[in-house]
Image: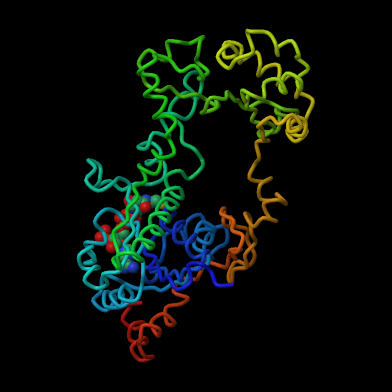
Amino acid sequence: MTKPLAGIRIIDFTHVQAGPACTQLLAWFGADVIKVERPGAGDVTRSQLRDIPDVDALYFTMLNSNKRSITLDTKKPDGKAVLEKLIKGSDVLVENFGPGALDRMGFTWERIQELNPKMIVASVKGFSDGHHYEDLKVYENVAQCAGGAASTTGWWKGEGAGPMISAAALGDTNTGMHLAIGILTAIIGRQQTGKGQKVACSMQDAVLNLCRVKMRDQQRLEKVGYLEEYPQYPHEMEAFADKVTPRGGNAGGGGQPGWILKCKGWETDPNAYIYFTVQGHAWEPICDALGKPEWKTDPAYTTAKARQPHIDEIFATIEDFIKDKTKFEAVDIFRKYDIPCAPVLSMYELLRDESLRKSGSIVEVDHPARGKYWTIGSPIKFSDLKPEVTASPLLGQHTDEILAELGYDGDKIATFHAVGVV
Ligand SMILES: CC(C)(COP(=O)(O)OP(=O)(O)OC[C@H]1O[C@@H](n2cnc3c(N)ncnc32)[C@H](O)[C@@H]1OP(=O)(O)O)[C@@H](O)C(=O)NCCC(=O)NCCS
């Protein structure tokens, strides 16, 4: 089967997570992704948080599958010449260096266009061009703070109150996914114009794009003065006094209130919980499931707004109903009533989840140095493409092969090795 991106060559000048996640996705779909790394060291994630001495860390192997690796010192004249050749023969260059690093290396947008007018140059930065913070270097949690996720996540009162970081990579992998959409769009655009273009996605923008409902809430709050679906309504109206969207704990973000509820064993199992959503049109089935038929007709419960003052009582009733049921048993009951809910799944459980393994969302890969390991496969499924995840490359594993493809002979390649260009 020909993969859809076969024939697209990508120079993968990325490191850490945001850039590598983007190029890994494109490699799964068939692009020839050539990871360009500094000789001797490579991507810093190869050596960070190693679980096996001297073997590429899982951080690296889980973000760089299906790629080839060439080492190249792009600050040396010969290294620059190799990169120029690569640019001339490639479709896309993806980078996520600190602001200005590519320019300092001599590869400005103008220079790249001179070398290859069809080139698409895709970048991740912390902030967008021209932003008053454009010079800042940024990692995941910095982006979550700058993009609105941290101020709207967590508890608004009590112990642990304050902005909170999500464990999900909203700044890193999420930005990489946005960038991948930008790259594919630019490739389609190039089919029409014959020209490449610059594509950029800032981590702040990518986080903000996921905080759309919170920006919605900010505007509603400024207009209406309160947010009726927030847990503070109506008992803690002072939380809305400063007209700043408050944190909502585990509340649902849409029009359907939801909460994380305790199940059997929560006292000792940190993940013995389910998420339960009180979906408007599922109210009657919820009453049936809970054995509370009187709530079906009581005007104090029949609309979402009427229920909100009683939402704690409603959740307490559900918790009481499931206190002798495991999270899986609880979901098995509620699913019969079409109630949107799920168990809180731990990483231990997800790693062993048969459905995820069957669908290819979790896959086992054989690596030449570490042996077998599990990684997260393509979250996107196709009818005519089953992405196969292969091992991440060892540092410089394909250096000689790629140099030969670029036309360098054995003597020249040996010289490059001898003088540390590769
Ligand atoms: C992630 C980040 C904070 C790391 O910062 P850092 O470790 O200081 O690394 P930088 O990217 O700033 O710098 C890399 C340097 O290595 C150099 N370099 C990279 N690859 C090289 C190569 N193959 N040969 C020679 N030099 C190389 C760069 O030219 C740059 O040098 P310079 O600063 O002297 O110009 C920074 O890259 C960044 O802000 N990136 C943009 C946002 C982002 O993607 N964040 C991470 C999300 S996971």
Q: Nearer the viewer, residue 284 or 155?
A: 284
The quarter of the rendered structure image containing the N terminus is bottom right
Figure quarter occupied by ligand 1? bottom left
Q: Nearer the viewer, residue 215 or 158?
A: 215
The x and y percentages for residue 197 are 29, 61
The x and y percentages for residue 157 are 48, 18
Q: Is residue 81 left or right of residue 396?
A: left
The x and y percentages for residue 87 are 31, 72
The x and y percentages for residue 84 are 28, 75
Residue 108: name its quadrant: bottom left
Q: Residue at x 52, y 60 (%)?
A: 57
Residue with the most extreme front position: 192
Residue 190: name its quadrant: bottom left
Q: Is residue 393 above or below residue 197?
A: below
Q: Is residue 325 left or right of residue 34?
A: right
Q: Nearer the viewer, residue 252 or 204?
A: 252
Q: Nearer the viewer, residue 235 or 41?
A: 235
Q: Is residue 239 above or below residue 347?
A: above
Q: Residue at x 36, y 90 (%)?
A: 409
Residue 378: name its quadrant: bottom right
Instruction: Count every numbered label the image shows and give the total.
Output: 0
